[in-house]
Image: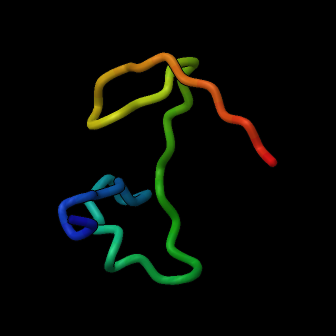
Amino acid sequence: NAETIKLVGKDKKPISVVSLKEGDEVLVHLTAAGRHFGMAVEETVREK
């Protein structure tokens, strides 16, 4: 359910992805591993 997925806004408060609007700013954290439900997973992506 998309409404249960939240991102963190630059004010450090959670934002539901269904509430996001164009121009909203969110914080990101880049890591080497991919994530699935918060768990690190090995993955590859092939663009076609």
Q: Where does the image place residue 19, in percent across and percent down from the top left?
A: 33, 79
6 left or right of 24 in image: left
Q: Residue furthest right?
A: 48
Residue at the (77%, 44%) spot, across then down? 47
Quarter holding residue 41:
top left
Residue at the (22%, 70%) spot, across then down? 3
46 above or below 24?
A: above
Q: Where does the image place residue 21, in percent across and percent down from the top left?
A: 47, 83
Quarter holding residue 44:
top right
37 above or below 18?
A: above
9 left or right of 33 in image: left
The residue lying toward the viewer, choosing from 34 and 43, is 43
The residue lying toward the viewer, choosing from 19 and 24, is 19
- Which corner quadrant holds the N terminus? bottom left
21 above or below 1?
A: below
Q: Where does the image place residue 24, in percent across and percent down from the top left?
A: 50, 74
4 above or below 34?
A: below
Tally of marks: 0
Residue at the (30%, 66%) spot, across then down? 15
7 left or right of 21 in image: left
18 left or right of 21 in image: left
Q: Where does the image place residue 11, in percent across and percent down from the top left?
A: 36, 59
Quarter holding residue 39:
top left
Snapshot colouring = rainbow
Residue at the (28%, 58%) spot, across then down? 6
